[in-house]
Amino acid sequence: MKLVILDRDGVINEDSDAYIKTPDEWIPVPGSLNAISRLTSAGFTIAVATNQSGVARGYYSLSTLYSIHEKMLSLVTAHGGKIDQIFFCPHSPDENCDCRKPKSGLFQQIQRHYQQSLNGIPAIGDSLRDLEAAKTLGCSPILVLTGKGIRTLTELNPLDHIPIFDNLSAAVDSILSGSSWSQYAP
């Protein structure tokens, strides 16, 4: 199975330091829905791994989170794409759960769900915690400069050789062209 793991906020949709609290606040990053469609057309299975601590913080309910995800899935489908599964952590940082990125719990859930190693699987994120979580199970982390991506550039270790792209669309171009992004697999 060809699998790609995407972060949500800042990769698929615009991010906000005030959180995405309603479906109306969920606005796709330009080109992201088309990028997911292109991955789908190329036979990739797409999983989303996202921290959603706004639930634990009381900014929105699980029901609202599901409504936000329904909007995302509907828009992706309308563009010819498909997100197979959404894995999310609803906990606050204080809860010290194992699923909040940069910990590996969400990626372990993905590995169990698909019953395959994540070694070399592209995992696209906009924050250092996305990239660190991806590396824990051997994914090939990819940074996009949307969302918190530009801020994340200052936190990267240059020796990690993490591929960097302007946005999800550019990262997908690289994946679909067979570029050597996989050379960075841990």
Image (cartoon, rainbow, N blue to C red):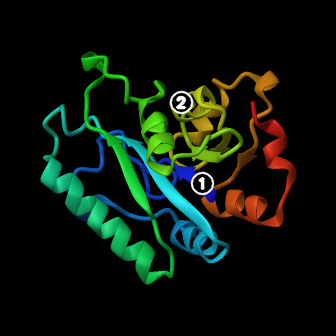
What secondary structure is found at the residue carrying circle 1?
strand
Q: Position of residue 78 (x, y in %)?
A: 42, 82
- In space, the residues marked 2 and 1 are separated at their CA atoms by 14 Å
Q: Which residue is mark 2?
A: 133
Image quarter of residue 37: bottom right
Q: Position of residue 120 (x, y in %)?
A: 71, 42
- For the point 38% across and 64% down, the residue is 27
Image quarter of residue 183: top right
Choose between 137 and 23: the one closer to the eye.
137
Most distant residue in the front direction: 115
Q: Which residue is mark 1?
A: 4
Asked if one can make out residue 22 in the rendered structure from this viewpoint, the answer is no
The amino acid on which the numbered mark 1 sits, given as a three-letter code, is Val
Q: Name above or below for residue 100 compared with residue 52.
A: above
Q: Position of residue 59 (x, y in %)?
A: 16, 41
Asked if one can make out residue 13 in the rendered structure from this viewpoint, the answer is yes
Q: Name above or below for residue 162 compared with residue 174.
A: above
Residue neighbourhood size for the residue with mark 1, other residues' Cα within 10 Å, grouped as few (<14), some (14–19), many (≥20): many
Q: Name above or below for residue 6 compared with residue 120.
A: below
What secondary structure is found at the residue carrying circle 2?
helix
Q: Position of residue 55 (x, y in %)?
A: 19, 39
The amino acid on which the numbered mark 2 sits, given as a three-letter code, is Ala
Choose between 34 and 186: the one closer to the eye.
186
- For the point 21% across and 62% down, the residue is 67
- For the point 16% across and 55% down, the residue is 64
